[in-house]
Amino acid sequence: MSSSIDTMTTEVGQPPTGGHPKGLYVLFMAEMWERFCYYGMRVLLTLYLIKSLLKGDNEAFAIYGAYTALVYAAPVLGGRIADKILGYRLAVILGGILMAIGEFMILGGTDHWLYIGMGTIIVGNGYFKANISSIVGKLYEDGDPRRDSGFTIFYIGINIGALLATTVVAEVGEKFGYHYGFALAGVGMLLGILFFIGGQGTYRHVAEPPHPEKLNAPYFGPLSLKWTTILGSLLIIPVLYFLVVYNAVVGYLLAATALYVIWSLMSRGIQEGNVLRDRMIVFIILMFFNIVFWACFEQAGTSLTLFADRNVDRMIGGWEMGAATTQFFNPLFIVIMGSVFSMLWVYLNRIGKNPNIPVKFGIGIILLGLGYLVVQIAPVSDAFLVPLWTLILLYFLHTTGELFISPIGLSMVTKLVPKDMTGTAMGAWFLSFAGSNYVAGLLAKFTGSEEGGEEAAAAALDKSVTLATYTDVYTTMGMVTVGIGFLLLLLSGPLNRMMHGIR
């Protein structure tokens, strides 16, 4: 595979020839294994909380929502530290090591070890996630038409990792024990770091610290700036432990952080003039529409997994698919369709028919809503189960919507903001994912129950009640999101003009 890649790549600074920089494929592999790690833990988390730690549905949703929200909020700080201090390469290495350690901590098997492991993973993800995406953007010069295609290829790597996680890790965790699944996720992260370090020669020129001479000089007593930053990061872990446990605080924290980020973006935009100001306004607006999409999409790890567990017939021949494994349909469809969409954007751009970014977002939100409306056409058996194709079609529509939004959003960030604040802006973009995951936990509560342990198991046995609840909630969710998608289509013209030529 490497020899074929060598013949089709061009380096940054060379005229585009249709291939991609070599560093893209190194980052592809590192991100693939990091997503194997993250989704491997996430795919099992709700079931682990309910079935092993005996939490009620709503308590599990609250913990899950707070954890995933903090995972996506952390890049706001991690991106800024990489921009100003560590550089992207060191930040990604530190993040990957912390994520692997966090997975292994969960093997302790208690609430305490789960929460401390979560805190460690959150810090690690803060350094890893935004900054590896920033490196991808920096491999391409301004105006390079390969950028959207490159981010879509990178996004395929994300979803191959998620596909492996939602099949291998999910099945191992459900069939042999959750701790085996979490351990497997940690091993995957170590593989990702090995790929990242081994291939650093292909991207290092765009990922170094902004002031390398200051990084290793004494800063705090005998400690250098690098080690002061690392130790300070470790001290945040107990704070995150507290936030996961007392998860209602997370909503207020996210709101305060969002206000700060919006103020930072708008201040920079106003200083630079009308063009950047307008682009920052569009960026902020699309962040809010991004929250709408992902708050509904991220039911996959919570209510949709329990829907699969309680009201979906998962028998295929003589084999029953695990409830967690049903999440694999999303990354499977990404892998199948991602390359098609990658070529589609290049082709549409060549013939001048490529939809602008707000239109793509609007179409994506509409497709998401249609996915939830599938529950209205699903036949119901005497046992109050719907066929597996219900989830397959739902995830197909959600995935198609995702391809209109997620890789396009990543590329948009690197286009709209000045290069010296790419990491900060990427962190702001992931903050919108943080808000959506927190809201997703709140939305999931409309389908859940408060009871834990045996009471929860007894409540889940009444499948007629659970099916009616899921159908009602998903239908409402679908109708609202379709309406919001059409609203964005109506706003797309003015928003596109405010982007001043960015497409």
Image (cartoon, helix red, strand yellow):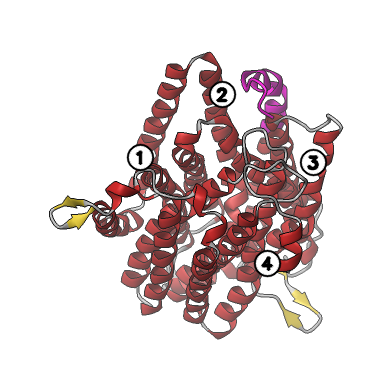
Image quadrant holding the C terminus, namely top right
CA–CA distance between discs 4 and 1?
Answer: 33 Å
CA–CA distance between discs 3 and 2?
Answer: 23 Å
Q: Is residue 94 magenta?
A: no
The residue where tag 3 is placed is 346
Upstream in the sequence, badge 1 or badge 2? Answer: 1
Q: Secondary structure at mark 4?
A: helix
Q: Secondary structure at mark 3?
A: helix
Image coords of residue 366 (percent x, y): 73, 38
Farthest top residue?
274
The disc placed on residue 440 is: none
The residue where tag 1 is placed is 252
The residue where tag 4 is placed is 326
* Residue 95 placement: quadrant: bottom left
The residue type indicated by label 1 comes to: Tyr
Q: Which residues are magenta?
A: 482-503
Q: Nearer the viewer, residue 412 or 439?
A: 412
Tell me the mark number nearer the camera, choosing from 1 and 2.
2
CA–CA distance between discs 3 and 1?
Answer: 41 Å
The residue where tag 2 is placed is 279
The residue type indicated by label 3 comes to: Val
Q: Is residue 497 magenta?
A: yes
Tell me the mark number nearer the camera, choosing from 4 and 2.
2
Q: Nearer the viewer, residue 55 or 43?
A: 43
